[in-house]
Image: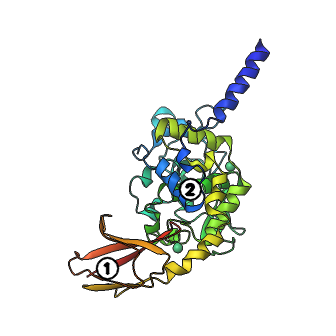
Amino acid sequence: MKRIILILSVFVLFISAKTQPPAGYYDAANGLTGAPLKTALYNIIKNHTVRTYPLWSWYDDTDLQPAPAVNKIWDIYTDNCNFTFGPSSSGGNQCGNVGTTTCICYNNEHSFPKSWFGDVSPMNSDIFHIYPTDGKVNGVRSNFPYGETSTGTTWGNGKIGFCTYPGYTGTVFEPADQYKGDLARTYFYMATRYENVIASWEHDDANGDAIMNGTSYPAFETWFLNLLLKWNAQDPVSTKEINRNNAIYNIVQHNRNPFIDHPEWVAAIWGNGSAINDTYSNIFNNISIYPNPSNEMITINNLNSNIVSLSIADIVGKIIYSASNPSQSLELNINNYAKGFYFLTVYADNNQSKTFKFIKD
Ligand SMILES: [Ca+2]
Ligand SMILES: [Ca+2]
């Protein structure tokens, strides 16, 4: 009997770790690849339940270490601090004073830094990219991109230093090997869940600019996309990620990370990375707006025939102008626009888009 119970409980554990999305959840994505697959996934996962920052109260559902640990936070930046879940008033290690060393308290790490998208909702409380981590290492990481550094200084289980991965030489934080795939799939989630806005984030912060290319697809600079693809391949989906995805879906936000459920969709969408960027980057890079700033006429030039539509939004995102199949050079009178910033988004026939900023003065 004991043996049957043991087999049964192992079976139940296996089932719970493998819980898949509800039947039909991904039906609209069937048979698609490339940017259309990404857009189909965006429509499936976009309307999640937005929770209130700072998310402390969800971590016992999403980020506890497995048994035999009891009530211990799973910290991806140290692995060995064994923080107890909860505020200090109930004996937990929720920050508190971060201090000058590791293992004092844990706080909320925006793995996709909030300064990269203007610290606004719903991104700033989307728990898919927010992990409980050691407060000190979180501070050291600051808002530097993830990368690889062979010369960096060790903090927790990661390193901070100059990037030694080809294509970037700025300061990066290198996470531990066992979480590189987790974080890559987190970033693929961000590029998908926020594909309607990510093209406008490129210049919010210099460190974000280093990894984003100002498009909705592929969304990332070539060096960083290649790094994410490498990390996704070398660190496959783990039980930790599956359990976290299920907890976020069932309890917290009611949406899923498609790249944990279907890691093969990373290649189906982004392929080998660099080829996608090369195809359309020149088309977008040739587009210009002048004069900028302007108080009357603007000319949008070099709209290649691959550009199928464009729109202009004001500072709060309201679309005030749109056009389909624009001619190669478009003149617009903006005399009646209020003074301020405007965003021109151009869409190509591969579903890729790029956003440009201009000023009415
Ligand atoms: Ca992993
Ligand atoms: Ca950039």
- Residue displayed at 60% across by 63% down: 146
Q: Would you identify the image quadrant in which residue 280 lies? A: bottom right
Q: Nearer the viewer, residue 108 or 289?
A: 289
Residue 359: mark: 1
Amino acid identity at mark 1 = Ile
For numbered disc 2, what is the local secondary structure?
helix
Question: On screen, 23 above or below 31?
Answer: above
Amino acid identity at mark 2 = Leu
Can you say which quadrant of the picture contains the C terminus? bottom left
- Is residue 217 visible in the rendered image? The answer is yes
Q: Is residue 70 left or right of residue 88?
A: right
**Percent of width and height locating residue 26:** 55, 45
- Residue displayed at 31% across by 74% down: 341
The answer to whether marks 1 and 2 mark residues whose Cβ atoms lie closer than 8 Å is no
- Is residue 85 visible in the rendered image? The answer is no
| Dot in front, 1 or 2 | 2
Q: CA distance from mark 1 to mark 2?
A: 34 Å
**Percent of width and height locating residue 344:** 38, 74
**Percent of width and height locating residue 222:** 62, 71
Residue 254: mark: none
